[in-house]
Image (cartoon, rainbow, N blue to C red):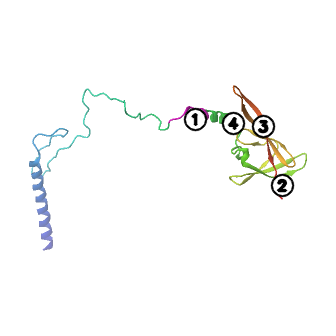
Amino acid sequence: MTRRHSIAALAAGALILLLAGGATLAAVPATPGPGATPAMPAAGPGKPAATTVPAAVPAPPADYHYQSSGKQDPFQPFLELDQALLKKKQEEQKKKAAAKGRPISPLQQSEIAQFRLVGIAGNDQKRTAIVEERTTKKYYPLAVGSYIGPNEGRVAEILADRVVVEERGETRDKKTKKMQMRRIPLLLRQEP
């Protein structure tokens, strides 16, 4: 008995859907509005009725011309670069290009002021110094001729109580720039 009732319910549902489809077909206007495609009439009671479909993008008028004034250029970079920043970047690129011939060690990535002289070992003929990089707390050995600092500083001397680093530096007068060697001492602090 339940099987008959379920079949009858399905048949009644299908009949209601067919009748509802015919009712929507009668509600469609005869002339389509702007931006809609005309509806196709149903071929029979078993086929669904076609409805109107709006056009995806309306076509621009034939005399339309794009005006870019007052609109943002999509190809312009988001960040505006000042001339000073641009020059600074170019100088950094030149320094990097000059340093490409030799590898850059961790000693050359920090300023000389970031290093603290921890110890000196050896005799008068050959000495080795140990420095600590203050931010990373790492220790590095130094010998005479080692590069240190980003400005191509080199260890010139290792004395009993200090390490002397020579570095090229610019001295700017009013009209000229001169490259001059600076001597930077790293002192071994005596513990009390």
State the image coordinates of residue 153 (x, y, percent, origin top left). Answer: 75, 39
Residue occupied by mark 4: 99
Q: Amino acid at mark 1?
A: Leu
Q: Earlier in the sequence, mark 2 or mark 1?
A: 1
Q: Quadrant of residue 68 in the image?
A: top left
**Amino acid type assigned to the residue bearing label 3 in the image:** Arg
Instruction: Write down the residue under mark 3.
Output: 182
Image coordinates for residue 34, horizontal then vertical, percent? 17, 38
> 4 left or right of 130?
left
Residue 81 on the magenta segment: yes
Residue sitting at 71 percent across and 38 percent down? 151
| Mark 4 / mark 1, whichever is N-terminal | 1
Q: Residues within 10 Å of mark 2 (few under 14, many from 20)?
A: few
Separation of marks 2 and 4 at Cα, in angstroms? 36 Å
Horizontal arrangement in the rendering, residue 43 relative to residue 190 (left or right): left
Distance from Cα at disc 3 to Cα at disc 1: 27 Å
Earlier along the polypeptide chain: callout 3 or callout 2? 3
Which residue has dot 1 on it? Answer: 85
Other-residue count near label 3 (Cα within 10 Å), few / some / many at <14 / 14–19 / ≥20: some
95 and 44: which is toward the camera = 95
Image check: 35 left or right of 192?
left
Q: Secondary structure at mark 3?
A: strand
Is there CB contact under 8 Å for labels 2 and 1? no
Inter-mark Cα distance, 4 to 1: 21 Å
The part of the chain drawn in magenta is: 80-88
CB contact under 8 Å: marks 3 and 2: no
Using the image, tell me which numbered label, if any, was put on residue 190: 2
Dot 2 lies on which element?
Answer: loop
